[in-house]
Amino acid sequence: EAQVTQNPRYLITVTGKKLTVTCSQNMNHEYMSWYRQDPGLGLRQIYYSMNVEVTDKGDVPEGYKVSRKEKRNFPLILESPSPNQTSLYFCASSPTSGLAGGQETQYFGPGTRLLVL
Amino acid sequence: AQKITQTQPGMFVQEKEAVTLDCTYDTSDQSYGLFWYKQPSSGEMIFLIYQGSYDEQNATEGRYSLNFQKARKSANLVISASQLGDSAMYFCAMREGGYSTLTFGKGTMLLVSP
């Protein structure tokens, strides 16, 4: 089954304790992305990756790191989490389209609910 | 300026009625794509419908249709014959500039009553 998986699904942690949220896709997609969703703000992009070893900042990258060593995996790293990073996080992937009008949608993971105390 | 604007924080509709969720966008690109996603209370993001900037006809997918008015830069989602299961948050999103990145609106919460 084609899917994007995220782990963990739920996480409660304390300020300053490093954590990693894993993301994996089995569709051989080139493009992967991380979003955070907060009430009243919609989804905002944190980082994205066009291919292996190619990553770039989105709209809200502060406090996050990513890596793309393999095509299928795109972990999100919070080196020193703070309470303002409490959010719902989504990983997504899609085949890269050379045309902005291309209709390839992004496939979303199930989300990770993070609470930082 | 916001690239995607959804002006309706919440909408109510009765079962079996049609409802329109508004979305306006801002881009200077000629080639772009518009998407609608549904997010039920369980949290997952479900792709509903897509409209390309060069598509001459409005997109339709079952009970979902997209009212695309290019000159007004609007891409409203129309849900016909609403069902209780349509109660969810709905997001409009745009892809532009030759990249796969999506920019999302803030969403509209739709509640369908019996």
Image (cartoon, helix red, strand yellow):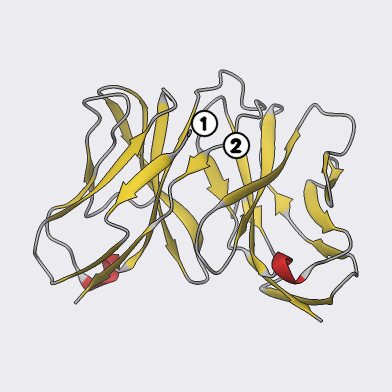
Residue neighbourhood size for the residue with mark 1, other residues' Cα within 10 Å, grouped as few (<14), some (14–19), many (≥20): many
> Do the residues at discs 1 and 2 belong to one chain?
yes
For the residues bearing labels 1 and 2, Cβ distance under 8 angstroms:
yes
Q: Which quarter of the image is occupied by the N terminus of chain B?
A: bottom right
At 45% from the left and 38% from the top, the residue drawn is: A3
Q: Indicate which disc, 1 or 2, sits on the residue closer to the N terminus.
A: 2
* Element class at badge 2: strand
Image quadrant assignment for residue A66: top left
Q: Can you identify the residue that label 2 sits on?
A: B95
Which amino acid type is marked by label 2? Answer: Arg
Residue under pointer 1: B100
Q: Secondary structure at mark 1?
A: loop
Binning the other alpha carbons within 10 Å of mark 2 as few (below 14), some (14 to 19) or many (20 upward) gives many
Q: Residue furthest top?
A: A98
Nearer to me, B98 or A102 = A102
Give the letter of the chain under mark 2: B
Q: Using the numbered discs, state the Cα–Cα distance from disc 1 to disc 2 in whole angstroms.
A: 6 Å
Q: Chain of mark 1?
A: B
Q: Nearer the viewer, residue A28 or B19?
A: A28
Residue sitting at x 83%, y 62%: B20
Instruction: Examine the rendering and report whether any part of residue B82 can be seen.
Output: yes
| Farthest-out residue, bottom | B114
Q: Is residue A62 left or right of residue A42?
A: left
Between B55 and B88, the one lying in front of the other is: B88
The quarter of the displayed image where residue B29 is located = top right
